[in-house]
Amino acid sequence: MQYHKLDIAFLNIGHFLDHFFLLIFATVAALVLTEEWSISYSQLIPYATASFIAFGACTIPAGWLADKWSRENMMVIFFIGIGASSLLASLANTPLQMGICLTLVGVFAAIYHPVGLAMLVQGRAKTGMPIAINGVFGNMGVASAALTTAYFIDTIGWRSAFIIPGVISLVVGLAYLWFTRQNQRHGNQAAPSKKAAAATTDGASSLSKKTWIWVFAIVCFTTALGGLVFQSTTFALPKILDDKLAGIAGSATAIGWYSFIVFAVAAFAQLVVGYLLDKHSIRTIFMVIALLQATFLAIMTQLSGLWTVIGAIAFMLAVFGQIPINDVLVGRISRNEWRSRAYAARYIITFSVMAFTIPLIAWIYGSWGSNTLFMLLSVVALIIFAAVLLLPGKPLAPQS
């Protein structure tokens, strides 16, 4: 059976919090800690690297435990663990201490994608819109992280940016624990029937082994490059806006608002893409999105002032638009009994690349500036386009 609406609400909140916690440090580092700890931005942000390594590496054990033990219990651990880790981060007094706390955040953050997405698509024939809606919550977490963190910096202090979300996540985790126990007590725990399971395995059963391997290889390759583009743009945007809006945005909160506007508007691209994925060929939609990424990222190098905000919205629309595509692909070609592990394999690639991206951003930004970063990302998007050309069309069409 499908999970109930309240289950889905908790899953959507979880996606919001997952991305929110991962980007608190990006804003704190850019706007406060460089001065407070007397360290340059390019020297400070690599301390987040271990967090993203954990974010990738821990998806495999998280997916395995979810398939073998309990997806619901793993989500409880996610909410409580990431909240407690954020509270610890608020106590950090050195870059090393912060790096250790952020690593714990990454360990628990790794749980969400292989577990939450497998729960989300369970028993569904058309997964484009559910994944897209869930993706909007994740990207609103990205958007809200920059805004709320900047607001807390200006009004209460940077430590509160870790404390308040941490407490909220703990409360949500306890609420979800109570909810799942009530479901179990009344016999409402979601478990896929044969008919429901078949609804999401038609794509897997229609592919030959050779085609399945080929499709999954392309998914992994485009996932890796897409993760590079996503992490570079979302992590570096507050700093890039701080540079290019000099004289226009005069406070941390102002930078936070501009970042929020960019991320919030762009997040809704997923709804359009999700709708199209349920109606049309993944291959065609994927090619268009990749071309738009390449175009808008290249244009960004020529912009300054408020035009930077317009350009940022344009390229983030294309970046966020790619997110549901690979998730829908994995959902269509995988069976329910090992779907968490399939998502784990997809996301360990994404998050491993994201970990590598942190020092890469520091090196490119420190050596050549943001325009070189955007040109390189534009080339990466063109490579994604070339890879998508190799996808089969008809076997991956939406089910009627």
Image (cartoon, rainbow, N blue to C red):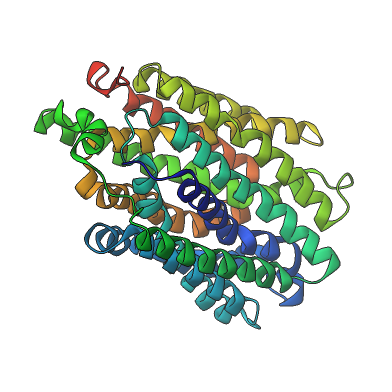
* Residue 182 locus on image (x, y percent): 43, 62
Q: Nearer the viewer, residue 246 or 8?
A: 8
Which quadrant does the N terminus fall into? top left
**Residue pictured at 67% horizontal, 65% vertical:** 29
Q: Is residue 254 above or below residue 55?
A: above
Residue 246 visible within the image: yes
Tell me residue 345's x, y (percent). Answer: 28, 51
Q: Is residue 73 above or below residue 15?
A: below
Q: Viewed as shown, does residue 180 lie left or right of 252? A: left
Question: Looking at the rendering, which quadrant does residue 154 occupy?
Answer: bottom right
Q: Residue at x 70, y 51 (%)?
A: 238
Q: Nearer the viewer, residue 28 or 115?
A: 115
- Residue 190 left/right relative to 141: left
Total numbered circles: 0
| Residue furthest to the front | 186
Residue 197 falls left or right of residue 50: left
Q: Position of residue 191 (x, y in %)?
A: 28, 49
Residue, far left? 209
Which residue does the image show at 29% across and 59% down from the upper left? Answer: 66
| Quarter of the C terminus within the rendering | top left
Q: Estimate the x, y position of residue 288 in percent, counting from the top left.
A: 46, 20
**Along the viewing direction, whichever of 25 and 359 lies nearer the viewer:** 25
Visible residue check, residue 368: no
